[in-house]
Image (tube, rainbow, N blue to C red):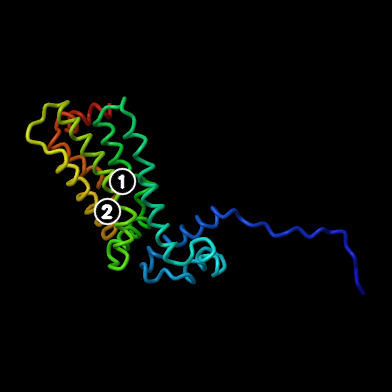
Amino acid sequence: MNIETNIERRPRRKAPPEVRRQQLIDAAMEVIAESGISGATAAAVTSRAGLSLGIVSLHFDGMKGLLTETLRSLAEEMRDVWADAYADVDVDPADRLRAIIDAVFNKTTCTPTKIAVWFAFFGEARYRQIYRAIVDDFDKEREGAMADLCALIKTQGGYEGVNPQSLATAIEALADGLWLSLLLYPDWMEPEEARLRIFEMIAAHFPNHFGASSQACEQS
């Protein structure tokens, strides 16, 4: 016996494409952090996201596209955190430099998962070319911004013997090393301590701006 009902069947809601893309990127980060890039298969990522296997090809044209956009999202997120502070020329150069360092170690960008993803791309030989193609410009922009600020601070404080470009390069290198320590020894170092190590190095070159007395004034 057929029973008619007046219940209207509603079509299943579909999430907007940008929502699905972000779900896949977030899932890819988690899988890469746990299993490396080689373990980041379409099956593993879609299973983690709770989505169908074919959706990777639909939104990213395959896993290479998803991995590329995952790395790009990290680089853009990092830039978004520091770029506005750097662009505000009415702010003291030392505070703008602090903002860039803070961006590297803040609670949004400096998480165990995201650090693991960065180093996965560092360590996977076949993906280093993708890393350089995407991130080189971001890295050069940030290092150039720090070099410009170091030059302003050098002039402002009358510091002799400081090479702004060399100092900016050293900050970048030390930040990478500290991120590696955060990844390998999470019980030994925390982001705030790593951040302070950077400022200790800067203070050796700009003591009047980043030394103990300036820190005390900043906290008071």
Which corner quadrant holds the N terminus? bottom right
Expressed as whole percent of the image width and height from the top left, the position of residue 195 reads 26, 44
Expressed as whole percent of the image width and height from the top left, the position of residue 215 reads 22, 31
- Image quarter of residue 97: top left
The amino acid on which the numbered mark 2 sits, given as a three-letter code, is: Trp
Q: Earlier in the sequence, mark 1 or mark 2?
A: 1
Please, which residue is most extreme toward the bottom here? 1
| Number of the label disc, if any, that sits on residue 143 | none
Q: 88 or 140, which lies in front?
A: 140
> Of helix, strand and loop, which one carries label 2?
helix
- Residue located at (30% from left, 67% from top): 124
Residue 149 sits above or below residue 117 on the image:
above
The amino acid on which the numbered mark 1 sits, given as a three-letter code, is: Val
| Number of the label disc, if any, that sits on residue 104 | 1
- Residue located at (90% from left, 65% from top): 4
| Number of the label disc, if any, that sits on residue 179 | 2
Residue 169 sits above or below residue 53 on the image:
above
- Residue located at (31% from left, 41% from top): 102
> Of helix, strand and loop, which one carries label 1?
helix
Which corner quadrant holds the C terminus? top left
- Image quarter of residue 34: bottom left
Q: Are marks 1 and 2 in contact (CB under 8 Å)?
A: yes
- Residue located at (29% from left, 40% from top): 100
Expressed as whole percent of the image width and height from the top left, the position of residue 84 reads 37, 35
Q: Is residue 164 left or right of residue 79?
A: left
- Image quarter of residue 88: top left
Residue 199 sits above or below residue 46 on the image:
above
Q: Is residue 98 left or right of residue 31?
A: left
Expressed as whole percent of the image width and height from the top left, the position of residue 54 reads 55, 69
